[in-house]
Image: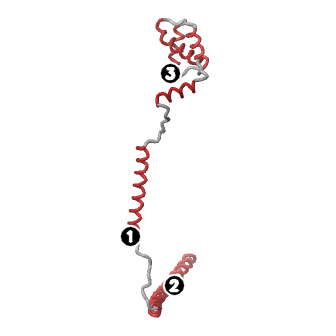
Amino acid sequence: MDSKQVEELLEKYWRCETSLEEEQQLKNFFQHGQADESLRETAALFQYFAAEKNRTLQENFEQGVTKQLRQRQGGKIIHMVSFRNVARIAAGLVVVVMATYFVRQEIRKSYPQELQDTYTDPQMAFEETKKSLMLISNSFGKAKREAGKMKVFNEAERKIQTKSETEKAAI
């Protein structure tokens, strides 16, 4: 592969437009060390990728890391929950509870107390209830009379409409 082709493939590679086959061509080119002086840095990058691909962890890697962590911390395991975070959560909960309490108090103030008996004498309560029901009954009677007037008006309107329809049919 000549250097012009390699440069074109590298341009596509940097724009993430190469296919897998083209990337394999670049890897093969740089693994064999055929790169010009201008492409030495890119060759080093591709050689690094190849070397890292072949790396594996040692068998005792996890135990070694755990041992180093314990030596650094004096054998203590640090918990990620701090007092500051707990205090923030507790303060937030206190604010929510207090806000709920004050809103509830305001709602109670805006609504009247539960209904209580206004009369201690049952006979007097009966008489007052009777007066209220008579007042409602009289109101219903007035409404019935007014509805009767509406009925007369509706009948007159219906007669006028039928009369005008018959006149139109006669013309």
Instruction: Give how far across and how far down residue 23 sits, in percent.
Output: 58, 17
Q: Nearer the viewer, mark 3 or mark 1?
A: 1
Q: Which residue is mark 3?
A: 15
Q: Amino acid at mark 2?
A: Lys
Closer to viewer: mark 2 or mark 3? 3
Residue 9 coordinates in the image, percent (x, y): 54, 15
Mark nearer the N terminus (2 vs 3): 3
Earlier-in-chain disc, 1 versus 2: 1
User: Residue drawn 41% across and 72% down?
Assistant: 111
17 sits to left or right of 90: right
Q: Pointer 1 and pointer 2: residues touching (CB < 8 Å)? A: no
Give the amino acid type for the residue marked by disc 1 in the picture. Ser
Position of 91 with respect to 145 (left or right) is left
Can see residue 25? Answer: yes
Q: At x 45% / y 88%, what residue is drawn?
A: 132
Name above or below for residue 8 compared with residue 70: above
For disc 2, the neighbor class at 10 Å (few under 14, some 14 to 19, many from 20) is few
Q: Is 33 or 105 nearer to us in this picture?
A: 105
- The residue type indicated by label 3 comes to Arg
- Element marked by disc 1: helix
Give SS at disc 3.
Answer: loop
Quadrant in which the C terminus is drawn: bottom right
**Mark earlier in primary sequence (3, 1):** 3
Q: Foreground residue, 41 or 135?
A: 41
Instruction: Determine whether the residue tagged by mark 2 lies in a helix, strand or loop.
Output: helix
**In the rendered image, which residue does mark 1 sit on?**
110
Q: Position of residue 149 (x, y in %)?
A: 48, 86
Query: Disc 1 and disc 2: Cα gap in Å?
Result: 45 Å
For the view shown, which residue lies furthest in the front direction?
Answer: 74
How many neighbours does mark 3 have within 10 angstroms: few (below 14), some (14-19), or many (20 or more)?
few
On the image, numbered disc 2 is attached to which residue? 151
The residues tagged by marks 3 and 1 sit, at their Cα atoms, a distance apart of 67 Å
